[in-house]
Image (cartoon, rainbow, N blue to C red):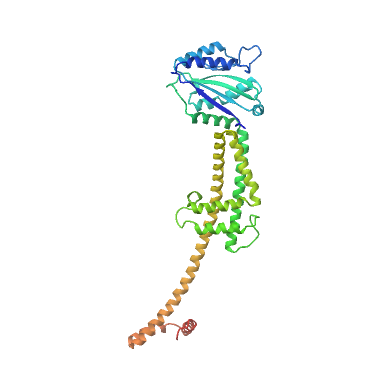
Amino acid sequence: MSSALIYKMRLTAPNKPGTASHNSNYVKYIAEREHVMKLSPESESGLFGRIDGTNNDELDVTDTQNYVYGISKAGVTVYNAYISFRPEIAKRLELDSLEKWQNYIKFHIETLMRGYDIPKDRFEYIAAVHDKKGQPHIHISFWNKDPPVTVQFVKKEVSDNVRKKLIHDTFANELSYYYGISNEAMSDAKELVGKLMIDFERDISGIYSNRFSGVDISEELIQWYTDILNNLPRQGRIAYAYLPKETKDKVIGMIKEMIMLPKMKSIINDYYSGARSAAEMFDSKETENGKSEIDRKMRKAAGDLYNRLGNIILKSMLRTLKENNEQRDKDNAEISTKITVDSMVYALNAVSRLFRTQGSAGTVNTAHALIGELSKQAKKDIARQKQDKGHEV
C-alpha cells in the first residue's frame, strides 16, 4: 500500500536547450488532459492559478503557455509537481469537486513557498486536477517570478521535506490520533515499570507487602535486576544512553523480560501499533525505500521506549544503592564508636602495665592517675570486658 499522499517534483534547468518549449507544452498537457476537472461543462480547460498577483479560477491555456514560455526563456526555473491520493483517501478528504481541490491547494500553497524558499509576493503558480480512476491527483507548476539566482537543480531532501510537511498538515487529525495512542501507551508503560521498581526496592528493604504494581516478579526479573545492580559503573553519570555496552545489554534484557509480562504486553502492542500507523502515513510498505524508512522509524520508537524505561530502572537502582550506602555508613559509624571506646580501655590498661613493670614511682603514679580517676564500678566493667575477651586480669 502506498503512503497516504504521493508528492513528486521535477524541473528542467532553464539554460538547457528546449526547456522553454517543454514547460509551455506541459501547461497544455495538464490543462486539457482527458480526466481534467473543469469549472463548468462550458469551460475550455481545467487550468487555474495565480499570475501577476491575481487568483484565477479559470486561466486561458494559450495565454498561460506564452507566459510560461517567456519566463523560462528569461531564466526563471519552473517547478512541475503533482500531489496524488488513493481514491478512498481522496473521498475521506471530500475532494470530490474542482472547488474543493482548489481550496485544498490554496490552503497548502505556503508549504511550497517555504519549502523552495520563494517569497509570497514573488510566488506564482498554475494547476489542474485530473480525476483519473484509481489515482486522483493535482498537477501544479510554480516559480519565483523574479529570482535572485537561477536554480539549476533541487536536492532530493528539499522535496522530501515538502512531501512530509504536506502529509503532516493534510492528515493532522489522524496523525494526532496515532501519536496519542503511542504516547498514552508510553505513559502507561513508564508508570507500570515505575511501580515494578518500587516493588523491587521494597523487597530489598525487607518490606513484603501487597504488590504495588499488581505483578508477580519472576525469578528471571530478579536475576536481571541483581546482575545490573552489580555491574553499574562506580563513577560517572548513570544514564541509559551512557552505559557500557555490557551493562546496557543487561538493561535491555530486563526490559524485554518485562515486556513479556501479561499486564505489559497490551500496552507495548498499542505503543508500536500507534508508531507504525503514523510511519505508514508517510511511506509505502510496497517499496524498498519505504520499508527501510518505516523500519528506521520503528527502531527509533523502540530506542525511545528502551531509553525511557531503562532510565526508570536505573533511577530505582541508584535509590537502592544510596539507601544501602547510607545504612552501611550508619553501621560503620556504630562499629567505629564501639571500637573507639574499647581502644581507650585497652590503652589505659596497657599504659598501667607498662609503667608498673618499669618500677618507677613517678610512672606508677602516672598510671595510677590514669586509672585512679575511674569509679569502682567503671573498674569492674573494665575487668568484666577483659574477661569476656579472654584477657588475663
- Comparing 186 with 265, the one in front is 265
Image quadrant of residue 297? top right
Q: Position of residue 182 (x, y in %)?
A: 61, 42
Q: Is residue 262 above or below residue 175?
A: below
Q: Position of residue 42 (x, y in %)?
A: 65, 11
The quadrant of the rendering that contains the N terminus is top right
In the picture, measured across the screen, residue 344 lies left or right of residue 300, that is left
Total marks in image: 0
| Residue under the image location 62 percent in, 58 percent down | 218
Q: Is residue 99 above or below residue 286?
A: above
| Residue under the image location 55 percent in, 11 percent down | 62
| Residue under the image location 66 percent in, 28 percent down | 88
- Comparing 87 with 209, the one in front is 87
The quadrant of the rendering that contains the C terminus is bottom left
Q: Position of residue 197 (x, y in %)?
A: 58, 55
In the picture, measured across the screen, residue 236 lies left or right of residue 301, that is left
| Residue under the image location 53 percent in, 13 percent down | 65
Q: Position of residue 272 (x, y in %)?
A: 61, 43
